Image (cartoon, coloured by chain):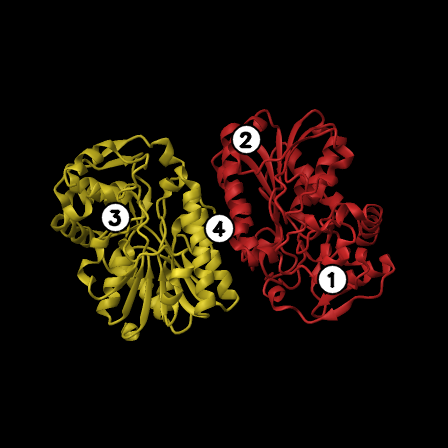
Chain colours: A red, B yellow
Amino acid sequence: MEAYSGKRVLVTGGLGFLGSNLAIRLVQLGASVTIIDAGIPGCGGNLRNISPIARDVRVARYDISDVESLRPLLQHTDVIFNLAGEISHSHSMEYPDRDLDINARSQMLFVRECGRQIPGVRIVYSGTRQVYGRPEYLPVDEDHPIAPVDYNGVSKHAASEYHLMLTRDKLLDAAIVRLTNIYGPRLAVNVPCQGVLSVFFMRLLLGLPIEIFGDGGQLRDPIYVDDAVEAMLRVGAAEKLKSRVFNVGGPVALPLGEIAALLCRLAGAPPPVHKPFPRALSKIDIGSFASDSRRIGREMKWKPKVLIEEGAARTLKFFRERLGDYLNPADGYPECPLRPKALKEKASAFA
Amino acid sequence: MEAYSGKRVLVTGGLGFLGSNLAIRLVQLGASVTIIDAGIPGCGGNLRNISPIARDVRVARYDISDVESLRPLLQHTDVIFNLAGEISHSHSMEYPDRDLDINARSQMLFVRECGRQIPGVRIVYSGTRQVYGRPEYLPVDEDHPIAPVDYNGVSKHAASEYHLMLTRDKLLDAAIVRLTNIYGPRLAVNVPCQGVLSVFFMRLLLGLPIEIFGDGGQLRDPIYVDDAVEAMLRVGAAEKLKSRVFNVGGPVALPLGEIAALLCRLAGAPPPVHKPFPRALSKIDIGSFASDSRRIGREMKWKPKVLIEEGAARTLKFFRERLGDYLNPADGYPECPLRPKALKEKASAFA
């Protein structure tokens, strides 16, 4: 990864979970990093995420749709990691126009401006496996039909199409990395509705029992954040892109119930409790998912390395040392209807 | 088509080209028709389109995103033909956020409200072959990859996905009809940038020479509006839908240069002139296109009947009798950068 030494790299959403881990790694690799992050409530941006590199990066607190302000920052950029957005499926079901605005409209304005200011720039967009919806087969490869079950999936897919459309027109040199459930240090445990692993870790950290909706039999292939970062970096550094879309999943697919039980054991907590699936969540549940990551393996020589036992232990250790940084209720999305009351009360202790 | 007799049918975009022809046919078939059309400048809505049925339909001049106002209209609706939107590819390249707003955001709010007020309602959405982009093979079937070359294609595809997503969730019973170039009476010749056939007819009617960009070798399969209306009606009336997406094209694919020459002969005009492709248009040109309409043929027993010679003659006759109704410059999209100056001057004679 010497490719990044001395390179000017832009990370949108760089105060978020994946973005901050990526920015920290880029600084280690000798890149000159600029973070663009508007800190939209509910999207997981947290200045404390970048405390290890606070003096080494430039942070521009602009919305990516504010292209006038961004113009001078874009010039002379070598690579863009485009991670800004809202990842919550359940938020999107309650506030679909907010999701469309953040994930589609803002991305459209941003990538259009990139194509104008720095034509042909390499841009790596963080997509989501949610665009595939309920899998027709497992593991899911990049040719699987697009059939999202929630508004977030539609908006994120539209954003992917903007990237690919401008690439076909030679204005960008974009790739889409479709990620599964990521976990690790800096996971947005403070923002509810960021996905099942975020909820699991948050509850463990607060001493609340983990709840499994349904039988817990649905497969998930969680990926440790360092592995996801490495995948993004390889795609960003590739001389020439053969493919434009890459599925990126973790090393093993396990039933969600087993993942939960494993986390409880690691945390020394009582085993998970089973509950009926709430209607709002069952609507957007995709059943079992496992990513077919062979394409990125073949074309980028990438492979996930960290098993969940190891990754989860590191994650718990990270948060136990910094719990106060991550449980400020002011960080959460205040109107989130799915925010558990118990969390609100518990979390207020950390305010 | 006795299926529509006595049915309460909603037509969004019902003042537009396809919508008004559909509404007229529905009235003939005995349906109780409500048109919803906000008359957004540039989208082709024209009250004169429905003069034959002005006393037989209810016209609600609301934007489809204004769900509060629409609520009472939605109740007790049997079928919805959802045609509201902006069809211009070139407008979308200049004003992509306008296109996203009209075609994606408004549609999202509208179909979501339909799913709430009249769950399970049959809704037929007018999609576009533009979502397929530059064809990888011909004729293009419904499994062809989605790879739009313009913002309009992305927005319209997002709108399709909203329909299909809510259908998977049993809130709608939707179908997408992906149409090719439609022509016929009430074509929005008064609104520039509505597609090549609109421009061809407009120029013929104004006595201007037809211009062919490039060699004119690219194939198109124009469909006469009555055939498109019949396709929509069959999908709307089908007892049960086996498929959810139907490509609908005309009876024959011809090189655009031949189509132009044919129109000139029918109109008694001099032959078309060839011009180099303007950059703005070559970017969004998809090359040759021909629709594989076998699925709707098989499942709905539909087949296009009107050949271009016949359809074009009917179209010219229609407009020659009503030219003043269709060349009011106030109808056009005033800021359209592609609006030819000559047209503006000629058209002002009809103001």
Contact, mark 2 vs mark 4 (Cβ under 8 Å): no
Measured as percent of width and height from the top left, residue A52 is found at: 78, 35
What residue did someone put label 3 on?
A: B188
Callout 1: 10 Å neighbours few (<14), some, many (20+)?
few
What residue did someone put label 1 on?
A: A342
Callout 4: 10 Å neighbours few (<14), some, many (20+)?
some
Q: Which amino acid is tagged 1? A: Ala
Position of B178 relative to A305 (above/below):
below
Q: Which amino acid is tagged 3? A: Ala
What residue did someone put label 4 on?
A: B145
| The quadrant where residue A12 appears | top right
Which of the two discs, 1 and 3, sits closer to the camera? 1
Mark 4 chain: B
Callout 3: 10 Å neighbours few (<14), some, many (20+)?
many
What residue did someone put label 2 on?
A: A69
User: How many numbered discs, if any?
Assistant: 4
Relative side of A193 to B169, left or right: right
Residue drawn 18% across the image and 38% down it: B347
Q: Which amino acid is tagged 4? A: Pro
